[in-house]
Structure formats: C-alpha cells, structure tokens
Amino acid sequence: MTKINFYGGVDEIGGNKVQLISPENSIFFDFGKSFNREGEFFSEFLQPRKLNGIMDLVEFGLLPPIKGIYREDYLKKAGLHHTPQPSSQGIFISHAHLDHMGYLHHIREDIPFYMTQDSHRIIRALEMTGIAGFNNYTTYQPDFLLLPKKRASKNSTTTHKRATSRDDIKKPRQIEIMEPYQEYELGDLKISSAPVDHSLPGSCAFMSDDGEEAVLYTGDFRFHGRREDQTRKMIKEAKKFTPTTIITEGTRMDRDHNLTESDIKLKAAEKARAHGGGLVIVNYPLRDLDRFYTFYQVAKESDRTMVVNTKQAFLLNEFGGEGYPGLKDVAVYIPRRGWGLLGGKSQVCMENEWISSCELEQEYLDSDYKGWEKDYINWDNNVNYLNLQESPGDYIFQCDYFEFKELIDIKPENAIYIKSKTEPFNDEMEIDARREKNWLEHFNIQIETGYHASGHACRPEIMDMILEINPEKVYPIHTRNKENFKPLEGEGIKVIDPVLKN
C-alpha cells in the first residue's frame, strides 16, 4: 500500500512536495518553493545563506528534514551526514513554475528528475538567464570546492589548466524526458504522464500504480486555454486508469467561472486597434507562452510588431518555433547596459576626449553585455528605446515590472498599459502594485486591467472532473478552500484533509 506524505502545498497555493512511498520505492511529485511561507522569513535582500547548506531553509520548515535526498556539498558544509545511496528514486515535475520545482537545486545529483520536454526547455531557460544562486536545476555544480591553480610545465611556457574554473566542474543532471502516457517502471511503481492545459507549456498530471493503490496527481490544470483537449484526454485516460486516490489542486475552488485566452485576445485586440498611433505596453508572466501567443496575435491583428525582452527571446529560441512563433516573427528589445552605449546618444570619455557612443567599435558595445544576452544584441530584428520613441504605433511592447526603468529612456506619450497578470493576493504584491501605479502615473500611462486568464480550473470544473473519474478518496492541495470539496462525500468519495509532515 502506498503511503503519501505532504511536505508542502497544504492550506497554501503552491509549495507542492508530495512523497509517495511504496513497499519498494520512494518518489516525489514536485519539489516546489512555498512563496508565502518563505516570504514570512526571507525577502529579496534577506536570502537563505548558501554557507549554511540547506539548514536556513530547514530551520523554518521550508525544506523537509529527510535523509538521503540532499546534495553532499551542502550537507557536509553544515556538518551533516551524507548517505551513500539516495533515499528517493526520482522527482517527477508536473510543470516549470517555481512553486512546483523551485527547490530542485538542493537535491543530490544521483536522484533523477522526470519531466516533459517543454518543462525541461523552460527550466533550462530559468537557469541560464536567471541570477546565479540556488538555480542548479538542469545542471549540478558543487559548491565549497577548492580548485587547483593553473600550473605551468617545467619544460614549457604553456599553462596547463586542470579544473581551475567552476564551469569545469559543472555537469548535467540526470533528467528523464517523459513521453505522454508512456509507462515508466521504478521498482514496483509504474508511472506515466498525462499532458494538461495550464498557463505554460509542458504541464502534466501523473498516474502511479504499485499494484495495490493507483494514484492520480493532477498538478495544475485548466480547461480554458489553448490545450483544453489535453485536459479532457487526461480525464478520459484517468477514468480508464481507475485511481483509488486523486491528489488534486484547488486553487480556484472559490470561483465558478474563468476568463478564457480567447476573451483576452478579443478584448486586447479591440483596445490596441482603438489606440491608433500610441504605444501599447503589455505585462504578462514571462514563461506563459500561451499569453505571449495571445498578444502576438493581437499585434498582428492591429498591424503592430510584438516586442519581447531578451529573456523571452532566449525561451522562444529554446522552443525553436515548435508550437509558437520563432524569433524571426518578433522584435527583441535590447536595453542599455553598463556604459549605456546602445542608441548612439550617450557620450564616453576616451583618452581625455568625449565622443559619441555611436563612434565606438562593436567590441565596446559587446562589453556592455555579458553571457547569454550577447547572442541577441546584433540581430537584425532588434529594437531599442529610440525605435519605440520614433514609431510607438508600430509596436506592442512587453515590459514587466522589473523593466520599468526602460520607460525613462522611452519617455512614452499617449501610451496604454495592459496588465495581464493576477491581482495582488499578499502584502508584498500590494506594495509592488502601488509602486507599479506610481511609475505609470508618472508617465501618464493609462492602466488597463481585467486581461488575465487563470492557469487553474474553477470549482464546477474540478468537481465534475473528480466525479467523472470517481476515485475512492481525494486529497485537496494547492488550495485555501479545501472545505469546498466536502460535497463529494455525498457522492461516496472520501475527502481527506492532507496533513503537513515535518
């Protein structure tokens, strides 16, 4: 009989860490970050210390104190014992949101991760374009390791390098790319993935069977996006699977309907066409490629060009045009960095003489950009703040909260701002929203709200899904409204309150 332990996702939205223990195996469904609970102790400028290994997170119950799952370098740095063999045979990632995979960095390198191809693409983009820190998601790079210095041969002036940089010790993690409905065997467990519609590609549910108990873990799902048919098929296949247990999300168990992606497209296209020659600014979740596609269609229908930032350009490049427009179909906004050389209006001092930055050679411009971003600064389809100043009516400009500084350069006139994100639901988000309002009002930018489609099914849809599959019992997680599942008991389905295990 499979035992189920919950180390996150109980009475909260996200933070899912669900352990299944069969007679022969132990696996996890998701290993996510709990934003609300972590926010009670940490913030942008008060972060967990790497020097203390995992213990800063364990101290506040953010990571479970389970032996045999954490990386050796962090355990030994904290003076803890590292077991030779892992205690878990794998972590199955339902999708690439941080509240479902954000703590993968802390997992030892000999525990494989199972995920879809699209989830791997998104997680890799997160790792490559994010700020260095706790982001060893697809690679493993030991910390607290003293590296040998470069050594010169006695008989030669050649310098021999032997693991003298951190990149030399970075290696790929064990990642299994799961094909839809293909069965994977881990000892007595047979596990398959079932694609679902959610607010980013690659999302899936998992079906696990140990011969005695069959478990459906839904991950996050919805019915009102571009892939509704995938969720419908998951329900059909799950019904044939006949699970004894469903572990399901219930994010919107307090809502009876949802705005659809089609609704957003129609409303936004009408707004963009009516705005004429002014700049249209949009803000949506960066990894929500369905929302990107919605605004890409809006741009085409309003005779504009969709402008994305370099992080989204990297992500689109990872997909290579599979299912979404490629980089040739959009413009990439290149911000000023470092010396601010881009655009040719600034001046720099060279040999005691101030010269225009446009007179500098390309190598100086390149020096303003580091790493992965350099790949995008010389593309033919680039735009910068000057283009948006001169021809604002030609573009829809994707600009998130962290890029508002670009407005200082663009100095938009007659601009509108379409906010396509969830409304604030905690104190930190409320503070950000006030700051957002201050920026937009300073530049006299008209704010348009009501353009967000949730990534989650609403209450009637979730209830219908459970009733159609008809399990023996249900565990509601990823919700603050688990009491709304209680009517299922009148249909002969036992609703079990999950208990957070410490």
Image (spheres, helix red, strand yellow):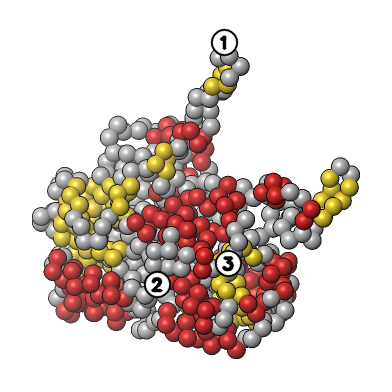
Nearer the viewer's eye, disc 2 or disc 3?
3
Query: In the image shown, does 124 or 490 lie closer to the viewer?
Result: 124
Q: Quadrant of residue 321?
A: bottom left
- Residue 55 versus residue 450 in the image, above or below: above
Q: From this viewpoint, which residue is outermost toward the front?
A: 380
Estimate the spatial distance between the alpha carbons at disc 1 and disc 3, rounded to whole Å: 54 Å
Q: Quadrant of residue 18?
A: bottom left
Q: Residue at x 19, y 77 (%)?
A: 467
Q: Is residue 37 visible?
A: no
**Quarter of the image with the N terminus in it:** bottom left
Q: Residue at x 58, y 86 (%)?
A: 273
Tell me if 213 is positioned left or right of 355 in this view: left
Q: Residue at x 28, y 65 (%)?
A: 195
Secondary structure at badge 3 equals strand
User: Identity of the amino acid at label 2?
Assistant: Gly
Q: Residue at x 57, y 74 (%)?
A: 305
Instruction: Check disc 1 and report the residue beneath it.
Output: 155
Secondary structure at badge 1 equals loop
Instruction: Check disc 3 and report the residue beneath it.
Output: 331
User: Identity of the amino acid at label 3?
Assistant: Ala
Mark 1 surroundings within 10 Å by alpha-carbon count, few (fewer than 14), some (14 through 19), many (20 or more):
few
User: Identity of the amino acid at label 1?
Assistant: Asn
Q: Are marks 2 and 3 in contact (CB under 8 Å)?
A: no
Query: In the image shown, does 298 or 81 lie closer to the viewer?
Result: 298
Instruction: Check disc 2 and report the residue beneath it.
Output: 455
Q: Which circle's residue, 1 or 2, is located before the other in the chain?
A: 1
Q: From this viewpoint, which residue is outermost toward the right?
A: 352
Estimate the spatial distance between the alpha carbons at disc 1 and disc 2, rounded to whole Å: 64 Å
Mark 2 surroundings within 10 Å by alpha-carbon count, few (fewer than 14), some (14 through 19), many (20 or more):
many
